[in-house]
């Protein structure tokens, strides 16, 4: 944790692997903001984002537990040679999922 003059922040790491979903749920119940890390690597993003994938599951869990704000991090861009097209594709898919399917407010993504 760390403090500023006006706030105290606690950072909880809740890994996204299937075996850690209970830990993710416990962490999410205490969260005001979620940091959703998605892989840009070919097939990793698709596997996590397809129906039943961990990315979708974590979005649903977060929204269900009352998290209102989400910061999305696109990781492993080096695996796709920092291609702008890949970034835009992932950004578009994740944004649509969070805003339309999960109904997160546009201003909070």
Image (cartoon, rainbow, N blue to C red):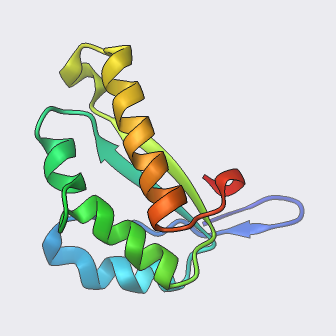
On the picture, is 67 further left or further right than 97?
right
Which residue is the extreme one toward the right?
A: 6
Q: Where is residue 50, by image quadrant?
A: bottom left
> Total marks drawn?
0
Q: Left or right? Give the position of 48 relative to 93.
A: left
Which quadrant, please, contains the N terminus? bottom right
The percent position of residue 40, horizontal first and vertical second, equals 26, 34
Where does the image place residue 32, in percent across and percent down from the top left? 63, 72
> Observer-nearest residue: 105 or 71?
105
Residue 6 x/y as whole percent: 89, 65
Residue at 48 percent of width and 83 percent of height: 64
State whether residue 2 is above or below residue 60: above
Residue at 54 percent of width and 57 percent of height = 99
The answer to whether residue 75 of the structure is visible from this angle is: yes
Q: Position of residue 77 (x, y in %)?
A: 30, 25
Q: Eyeballing the image, is 45 above or below 82?
A: below
Q: Residue at 45% of width from left, 64% of height from top?
A: 101
For this orientation, the residue located farthest to the front is 100
Q: Which of the pair 17/95 is nearer the observer? A: 95
Whether 32 is drawn above or below 4: the answer is below
Location of residue 87 with respect to 99 vertically, above or below: above
Query: Residue at 27% across / 31% down in the picture?
Result: 76
Residue 14 visible (yes or no)? no
């Amino acid at each position: 944790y760390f403090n500023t003059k006006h706030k105290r922040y606690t950072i909880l790491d809740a890994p996204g692997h299937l075996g850690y979903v209970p830990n993710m749920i416990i962490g999410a119940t205490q969260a005001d903001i979620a940091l959703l890390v998605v892989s840009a690597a070919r097939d990793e993003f698709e596997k996590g984002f397809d129906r039943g994938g961990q990315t979708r599951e974590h979005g649903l869990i977060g929204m269900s537990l009352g998290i209102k704000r989400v910061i999305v991090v696109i990781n492993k861009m080096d695996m796709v040679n920092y291609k702008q097209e890949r970034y835009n594709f992932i950004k578009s898919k994740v944004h649509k999922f969070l805003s339309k399917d999960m109904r997160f407010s546009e201003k909070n993504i």
